Amino acid sequence: MGDLFKEKLISVQPTMKNRFIKVFFVMLTILLFFFGVMVHPAFLLAGFAMILLDIWLIPRQSVEYEYSYVNGVLDIDKIYSKQTRKKGASYELSKAEVIAPVQSDHLSDFRNVKVVDYTSGAPEDERNAWAFVITENQERRKVLFSPTEDMLQDMRMRAPSRFYTV
């Protein structure tokens, strides 16, 4: 009756590091084949090995996060190149210490906590991002994410004493 199921897909903006990795590994593969033809055939074997590494590594540079929110439980999966899904994390928000916007003063006590970022990295997403602090396996984490309005309303209803809007 009061069940809520919401999903949201977040495309992560490619960073300079992602672009560098793609270009570097492709250029290295080309160079190995060039040296294999011009210098020594052993470089050809290394070039074929690099192709396998490229096939595995380059698609992992394109990431999307899928949020699945069901009755206070937030599941976050990673999707690589819109093909491969990897189970990310699952957070029971009833165990969260604080749920607030990223710029909120209520998060200032948690500056030295490990941060896990599930936002897109885009400037407009950073301004609208939210965070919650949760303890898992004796480790405190601040999780950044971009919820929908329906998710926020449900979180406010389930944990009003830990939910802050400013």
Image: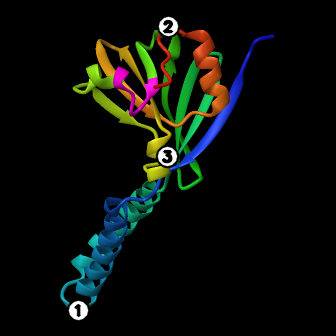
Q: What residue is disc 3 on?
A: 125
Disc 2 from disc 3: Cα separation: 26 Å
Q: Position of residue 124 (x, y in %)?
A: 49, 50
Front position in the image: 128 or 33:
128
Farthest residue to the bottom: give it. 38
Disc 3 residue type (three-letter): Asp
Residue 158 in view of the camera: yes
Chain part drawn in magenta: 100-106
Query: Relative to 6, is 26 above or below?
Result: below
Q: Secondary structure at mark 2?
A: loop
Residue at position x 48%, y 19% in the image: 164
Is disc 2 surrounded by few (<14), some (14 to 19) or many (20+) residues within 10 Å? few
Q: What residue is disc 1 on?
A: 38
Front position in the image: 55 or 45:
55
Q: Is residue 158 left or right of residue 97?
A: right
Residue 104 sits inside the magenta stretch: yes
Residue at position x 57%, y 33% in the image: 147
